[in-house]
Amino acid sequence: MLQHALLESSEDRKELSRNWPALRGQSLSFDGLAAVNGAGPRSDVSNARSTLHEIPAVGVVFLMSAINAVSYGTLLFATLDVDAASHATMLPNGTSIWLLSQVGAQLGTLFVSDIRSGICCPMLEMIPIFHAMFSTIASKMPESSLPEVQGTCIASCFVCTASIGITLLLGARLGLAKYLRAVPLIVLKGALFGVALFLISSCLQVSTVSTLSLEKTWHHWMPAVLLGLLLFGLDEAIHSPVAIALSLLAIGVTPTLLDVSGLCTISNLQEQGWVFYGAQDSAADSDAWYVQLIDVYASSFDKIHWLVILEMMPTVLGIAASAALLMLMDLKAVELLTEREFSLDKELRSIGVSNLFSALIGGGWPCYILCSLNVTCHRLGGRSKFVGVSLAVGAVVCLFLVSKLLPRLPRILPGSLFMWLGLVFVKETIVDICSKHTHKSDVFIVAVMALVVKFYGFNDALLVGTLLAMSFFTVRYSGAQVGVRTSGDARFYRAICTRDFTEHSALEELGHLIEVVHVSGFLMFASTPAFTDALRKLMADASEGPEWILLNCQNLQGLDYSAALELATLGRKAKESQKRLVVTELQGSVQEVLEQARVELKALPGPGSPGNVSYGLFYQPHYQRALQRCENAVLARLGQRLPSKSQHMLSRLGSEEAFMRDVLKRYLGDFLPEEVLQEKLTIALALFQRQIVEPGTVVWHAGEECTKCACVVEGTLHAYAHSSRERTGEAPLPQRSGLGSSVFGRDRLVCIAGPGDFIGFLAMVNHFPYEHTAVVPMREEDDEEPESTTLLVLERSQYQELLISDPPLGQALVRGFLRQISYEWRELSRLSVA
């Protein structure tokens, strides 16, 4: 590392700039370099060890998938199974359909997805949507027989799944995934609440015998409800997927244990409605699962009403759009909870392939990358395709065993699972929205969607929620433009502080290590993708691009829930990419939104350790101080002398006079001959008067006639620009600033003058009134007690006499001032062009 290397010339700095990425990479470990260079595994032993570490993840995920297949399989065609007692139905076994779809889904993920341990499975949220579609098809076929209705519904399911696959492949090919990111996340939360209501109602239905009413079978569904509540409490208490999986396994094996112990036989439990019925009453039912499926598909093909399916194509397209939204929701959740980054286009393509595989191999149920299983797998150590391969193989094995296992499973198993997941979804929706909502309209949208789900349907709720969200945001942000106002590195954007020619030259060479981004307007669901894409490009490669990204939010007027979550994601991305994302100048409303969304903003460490700041997301209230610290961190790597507390300078230089000579030399040294420099410094130093100013003192007000400029010797001086003309001339009361608040309410801190900094010279040189109010702060961020500030003041009358008595010295002083101003004007010109 080159953190303390001294550069003797500009050529040294140029060489460092050219070689910086390569030298920075030398800090990687040998294993890390091997991984970057594509080296193979270190040994077969390490591979075997990593595989053993993934076995717990495989076991829990496989158990959860098997339980899901049995549980949700009973719901797939529940609305069509109206004559199950007489076996007059032409429906495939729902559990077999679920498992086949699981195999097809996992194959697509293994072949295409970039998520190495990605788990793709049938889509739970499609069950209520397909039930609504089946009911619509039945209403369009009032004169048709039951087999015709069932065959048409099964065919519509295959057509819909294939359409989803084709739509996702075409969308990924055309790069349309970015438009999905503009969907309001609050609508997806509302959709999750609709699924929760469906699951809770399904808990009661699946736990009872369908021919009896709920009032007569309360003793069947009540245990399922209580067990679901216990699972929910257990999950909230210990947050262990292993414990949940083992609890579900214990519920599943209870009938078998009762049968083995002799307390009660399986047949008695079936007669009383506690266990699922066996399928052994006919030769057809005793055949293998694939024989049953082939017979069902072959016998129903000639009974399909294709014209009805054609009439349902608008509904199919709507279902495809709903599926895309649900896929986006789970992909976003996986990204947030596992803190992994992946290409949305690539993952939608893999899900599209998975849906096509699901249709081609006979499953025909839509599938997606499920958040819960992927997060569980990640937390248990699943990191490779070994998990996906094991899950696909396990699903095939279950296909041959399910007919024997299903008659031994209790009805309260899926019932308790539905109740638990329903309560989890309710908690994730209601509690999160109430505690993290960015606006009252969020709660209203979710409440309306819940009512629509209850009395109309799932698709209707999605449509109503989307229209409500867009309407609210349109009214709220009507006419507001948003986005990155301008972006540039530290070669153009420079902190307003005193630096000599050597430091300015170093920043010219290494300014690309700091990127300054100015944001304006509103950040909401429709504009956030463009904003995040601009920042993600800066974090694409850890070895290239800027090390510091400064986000100036002075003109950011507001943001919504989607933007708040994206900012948290950018913070994690910065940490992964070994970058530092620094947010500054947050307005009060923006701060409130981030606090509601629980976005953690760490304070940017003080100037005492500029080169030892960790990676991630930071906050610094003032833009100028943040930019100055970023510059100091870059200069610290080069061993450059940084502006520091005057006592440190005094200890090095020996006296206050020597310190002031050093400061004046930085301003004048480049513009005076070496042989007369010391003499001119003595003359210039005699013009200044020493003053000690106490904390809270206003040195001058904006709008007053300029009579002097000042140089800070010890302490700090803040300059504020007023936000309105009527406030000009007021003496604000300085106070300790909080997160996102200005020290003077609506006034903005524009300059932080520390030891060696001049302030007020522009107004004095041009005979202008003061543009800013200068005040000694009550308390510095890094000090526990307020400190007085020592100034050297140059009166305007003394300066005017100098111009007459010693023109070369007066000209050198003006040129030093102009050099400092030139960097400030360069930034202002870029902002004005933007």
Image: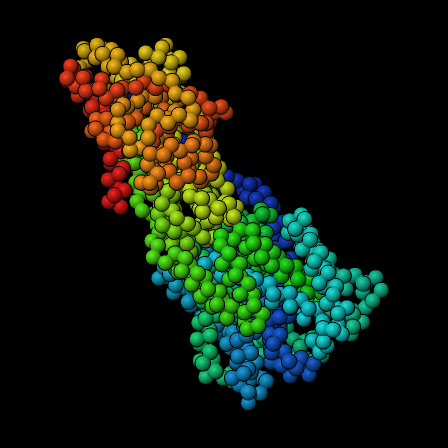
Q: Position of residue 716 (x, y in %)?
A: 39, 24
The answer to whether residue 98 of the structure is visible from this angle is yes
Closer to the camera, 656 or 332?
656
Which image quarter is the N terminus in?
A: top left
Q: Which quadrant holds residue 699?
A: top left
Front in this rendered view, residue 565 or 246: 565
Q: Which residue is drawn at the image coordinates 20% and 29% (left, top)?
A: 766
* 715 over 749 or under it: above or below: above
Q: Is residue 297 above or below residue 503?
A: below
User: Among all residues in the image, which is located at the extreme bottom?
Assistant: 143
Q: Total number of numbered labels?
A: 0
Q: Quadrant of residue 703?
A: top left
7 or 613: nearer the viewer? 613
Residue projecting furthest to the right:
262
Residue shown at the point (19%, 17%) measured from the top left: 802
Q: Name the spot of residue 445 as percent of width and height, x first.
A: 51, 62
For the point 65% across and 63% down, the residue is: 418
Q: Is residue 630 visible?
A: no
Q: Report the coloring of the rendering.
A: rainbow
Residue 100 locus on image (x, y percent): 56, 67
Q: For this rendering, which residue is in front, 339 or 745? A: 745
Which residue corresponds to the image point at 50% horizontal and 42% vertical from the top-left? 600
Q: Position of residue 446 (x, y in %)?
A: 53, 61
In this rendering, is residue 581 above or below 679? below
